[in-house]
Amino acid sequence: MSQMHPRMKREQKTVELMIALYCRDHHHTKRELCHECRELVEYTRLRLKNCPFQENKTTCGNCPIHCYTPKLRDKIRVVMRYAGPRIAWRHPILAIGHMIDGRRKEPGSKKKNKE
Ligand SMILES: [Zn+2]
């Protein structure tokens, strides 16, 4: 975990913040996440860790590989839809970073290299 690329760390942090925000507002938790949301966090950690693209990845929402199970994918989607706009207020730097990452073309797609 400590070896994680900063890009991946940020992604993880963003996701966790969103889940925490969602949990607090929907499951009325205070500091701790509810069991369900904790599981979701664990799951996203695992997915990011196993992501074949790592720091070159686009955001999960734009990724061509849908590695989440349909059930959890729906869940995370709901969380993002709710927390995405809200987090932009509180953590603008994270939100902007996430937006920029989302513009990246997925690796392996045809791209014009300007090297
Ligand atoms: Zn929850």
Image (tube, helix red, strand yellow):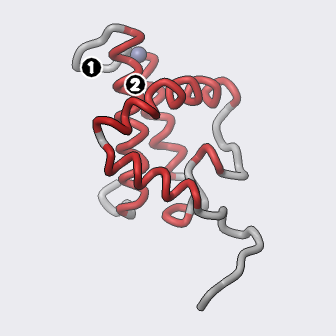
Determine whether the beta carbon of the residue marked 1 sits less than 8 angstroms from the nearest atom of ligand 1.
no
Looking at the image, which residue is at 35% across and 26% down?
A: 20
How many C-alpha atoms fall within 10 Å of the one at disc 2: few (<14), some, or many (≥20)? some
State ligand 1's quadrant: top left
Residue matched to label 2 = 38
Give 29 or 69, whichever is nearer the viewer: 29
In this view, the residue in front, 78 or 88, is 88
Residue position for label 1: 32
Name the residue rendered at 32%, 51% in the picture.
93
Q: How many numbered marks does the figure carry?
A: 2
Side of 105 where 40 appears, left or right = left
Q: Residue at x 59, y 63 (%)?
A: 104
- Of label 1 and label 2, which has the lower sequence position? 1
Q: Is residue 62 above or below residue 86?
A: below
Residue at 72 percent across and 75 percent down: it is 111
Compute the Cα span from label 1 to label 2: 9 Å
Give left or right: position of 67 versus 40: right
Q: Position of residue 58 (x, y in %)?
A: 58, 57
Figure quadrant of residue 42: top left
Q: Quadrant of the C terminus?
A: bottom right
Q: Please give left or right for residue 65 compared with residue 78 in the image.
A: right
- Label 2 beta carbon within 8 A of ligand 1: yes
Give the structural element (helix, strand or loop) at label 1.
loop
Quadrant of residue 39 in the image? Answer: top left
Label number found at residue 79: none
Furthest-right residue in this view:
110
Task: Judge whether 31 appears above or below 13 on screen.
Answer: above
Helix, strand or loop at disc 2?
helix
The x and y percentages for residue 88 are 37, 39
